[in-house]
Amino acid sequence: MWPDRRLLEKLDIVHPIIQAPMAGASTPELVAAVSNAGGLGSLGAAMMQPEAIRGAIREIRRLTQRPFAVNLFNYPLPAPEAEKVARMKQRMAGYLRALGADPAKLPAMPPMPDMAKQMAVILEEAPPVFSFTFGLPERGYVAALRGKKVFVIGTATTVAEAKALVDLGVDAVTAQGSEAGGHRGTFAAPVEDSLIGTLALVPMVADAIALPVIAAGGIMDGRGIAAVFMLGAAGAALGTAFLTCPENSIVHPIYRETLLSGRAAPTVVTRAYTGREARFIKNRFVADMAAAAAEIPSYPHQIPLTAPLRALGGETKNPEILPMLAGQAYPLCRALPAGELVQTLVREAGDLFAGLRGPGLGANDVDAVSP
Ligand SMILES: Cc1cc2nc3c(=O)[nH]c(=O)nc-3n(C[C@H](O)[C@H](O)[C@H](O)COP(=O)(O)O)c2cc1C
């Protein structure tokens, strides 16, 4: 039924439906459930220490024989920004005190994982698929991965980025539209110049490169999947839609409840929590930080500075401070088990494709729409 079968053949999967990588929001159980249902599960491993990544890969292998992906962030480390960090630390302490918390009593964060050490584990474990975002890893990594028969997927938010990924030697490109939840993958131009919606980005990228294009951003059901295939995609990646699956047990219950609440608070692209632009559900903290945007240190310096706030938000079940990454279409979230969600998506997209292959417009229909 799939109009483009390239990914099915190259990856040995049954459905070109990818559970998009989500750091801090994808468990081995979720990844394996999606892969066992014929899609491609992805472990968002960017925030995991190297040995935790190894453990998770082995756990996924225990739970499924099917292909799966592991994903990392690739970013150049910024200068230390000591003064900015010190000022933000003070600001955050004041913010926490205003919420009635003692900053000294809130847990600090372990050091950020080292990408070189993460990559060493990836190369040793050689998962079937490796995907990355935030830029171009060293060419040597891509060559080494391909040498181990790992299928490599890079993330682009513009046509120029997609072409740079092709030059690097990846096997497929994820075109991440601006609707997407999570961090922007942008690396070649300022984010504000790279916020292209999925409907516009996918056909432009599909025209510009010969590799399979995976569409991401705002896809929540069979309608979105069928639509991106019509735009030239060879696969559909859904992140937010998988946040509410019960296998995703690390998603905080308040976050899950907010996604499923039907309240439809707006989402916004902000640097407030991490120092890098990412789409979150707008809450009180995001709104409060808007005035201080210029004072926010670069990624990843801001992450440990907001860690106590994340801890407090979780402890006190407060969605006004808890970070909740989500795509624009999050009100369409369903609370289905992951395997059932994949089957539902396949059925919904299949019904739409079957309708397209139907009798088509008859002469009377054409008359009816003619002026
Ligand atoms: C909670 C969350 C975490 C994410 N973490 C990552 C990540 O670690 N790596 C990555 O490449 N993309 C990450 N993303 C982006 C997704 O892979 C994908 O591009 C996005 O979810 C697609 O848009 P949608 O959320 O509207 O489906 C994340 C998205 C969300 C919602």
Image (spheres, rainbow, N blue to C red):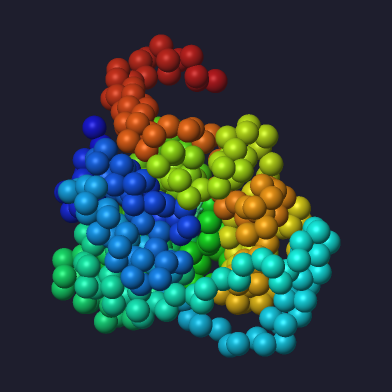
Q: What x and y, as percent, mark residue 134?
A: 46, 69
Quarter of the view holding residue 17: top left
Quadrant in which the C terminus appears: top right
Identity of the residue drawn at 72% across and 82% down: 86
Name above or below for residue 88 compared with residue 198: below
Quarter of the view holding residue 355: top left
Identity of the residue drawn at 32% across and 31% down: 343
Residue 50 horizontal side relative to residue 292, left or right: left
Q: Is residue 217 visible?
A: no
Which residue is outermost to the top?
A: 364
Q: Is residue 308 visible?
A: yes
Identity of the residue drawn at 65% across and 86% down: 81
Which residue is outermost to the right?
A: 98
Identity of the residue drawn at 27% across and 55% down: 59
Residue 190 horizontal side relative to residue 55, left or right: right
Q: How many marks?
A: 0
Residue 368 horizontal side relative to residue 162, left or right: right
Quarter of the view holding residue 226: top left
Which residue is outermost to the front?
A: 105
Q: Nearer the viewer, residue 110 or 192?
A: 110
Q: What x and y, as percent, mark residue 225?
A: 39, 38
Q: What x and y, as percent, mark residue 239?
A: 45, 48
Name above or below for residue 341 compared with residue 119: above
Q: What x and y, as percent, mark residue 269?
A: 63, 58
